[in-house]
Amino acid sequence: MTFNQLYHFQTVAKYENYRKAAEELYISQPSLSRSIAALEEELQVPLFEKSGRGVHLTKGGHIFLEYVDRILEDCRVAKSKMQEIASGGGKIDIGYVFPLASHYIPHSVRSFLHREENRNVTFNFYQNHTAAIHQKVKSGELDVGFGGYIDREEMDYFQILSAEIVLITPKGHQLEGKEMVSVYELQNYPVIGYDRESWLGNYTQQLYRRLAFQPNIAVECPDEHSIVAMVSEDFGIALVPDIQEIDPQRVNIHRLYDMELEHRVYMFWMRDRYQLPVVKRFVEYMKEQGAVERL
């Protein structure tokens, strides 16, 4: 069974007439008849039956046509995608952590797409914790990830952002009015933490072990939005990166005077895996944006 045979079959089914199908295909009618006959012999099922001066699909022919239409459409789409890639377009699959969702990723991607050479580029977005993003980059589901650093030799990393880690408390809290506080204040109040499976959840648990105390974790949250919401309603205090989502109208923001803590965000990709030209162009574009920015 060849591609030409499938296309010949589809064309005959369209016109229900060998002569008209042969004219569209620019081949002789005998050649077309031989092609269909060979296909029927291979399938061991008659695909057409005579009807006056034309032909009609048999029941088997109708079933076969459903698959042939699907196959040829997939081939058309595949060819179109390859032509798109060859002309500098294509799809980029990226994953990123929650703090990048409100501004950094949307702004960076839109700026990239505004360039003339990227007019045929599309993006697929995936938002999750760092570990989940790493796994999808490793499996090939994602081309590029953005998140915390996980030491994996098979990946390349490029730092793109950093954010100071601060302590936030609810309005009216005992620490209100203090610009700087001690990290050990976490021992004195309930704490709103990150999910332990997240990069920041793992980071803060390591910090507590280093400080030799375990705070009273009231609840664990997936992202800064939910942490700010819990803190603002006086369920506890929290360590968070000082990002745009931390609204000083809702919570108090305190810097730490006895520790310098920083959340660094990296762009990462598989080191030895082939990348489409458009993915390479996106990676280089992100690198060219300059020095590490503050979140």
Image (spheres, rainbow, N blue to C red):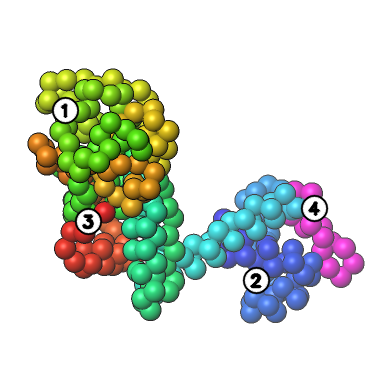
Q: Using the numbered discs, state the Cα–Cα distance from disc 2 to disc 1 in whole angstroms.
A: 86 Å
Residue wearing tag 3: 294
Residue 81 in percent (x, y) is at 46, 65
Q: What quarter of the picture does the N terminus occupy?
A: bottom right
Give the amino acid at mark 1.
Tyr
The tag earlier along the polypeptide, 3 or 4, is: 4
Looking at the rendered structure, the secondary structure element under dot 1 is helix
Q: Using the numbered discs, state the Cα–Cα distance from disc 4 to disc 2 in whole angstroms.
A: 21 Å
Residue wearing tag 4: 58
The region drawn magenta spans: 47-60
Give the amino acid at mark 2.
Ser
Residue 177 inside the magenta-drawn segment: no
Residue wearing tag 2: 31
The tag earlier along the polypeptide, 3 or 1, is: 1
Q: Residue at x 41, y 48 (%)?
A: 126
Disc 3 + disc 4, Cβ < 8 Å: no
In the image, taking residue 3 as reference, residue 236 lies left or right, namely: left
Q: Using the numbered discs, state the Cα–Cα distance from disc 3 to disc 1 in whole angstroms.
A: 25 Å
Q: Residue at x 90, y 67 (%)?
A: 52
Foreground pick, 27 / 138: 138
> Badge 4: few (under 14), some or many (20 or more) residues near its Cα, within 10 Å?
some
The tag earlier along the polypeptide, 4 or 2, is: 2
Q: Using the numbered discs, state the Cα–Cα distance from disc 3 to disc 4 in whole angstroms.
A: 67 Å
Residue 237 in percent (x, y) is at 30, 31
Residue wearing tag 1: 184
Q: Nearer the viewer, mark 3 or mark 1?
A: 1
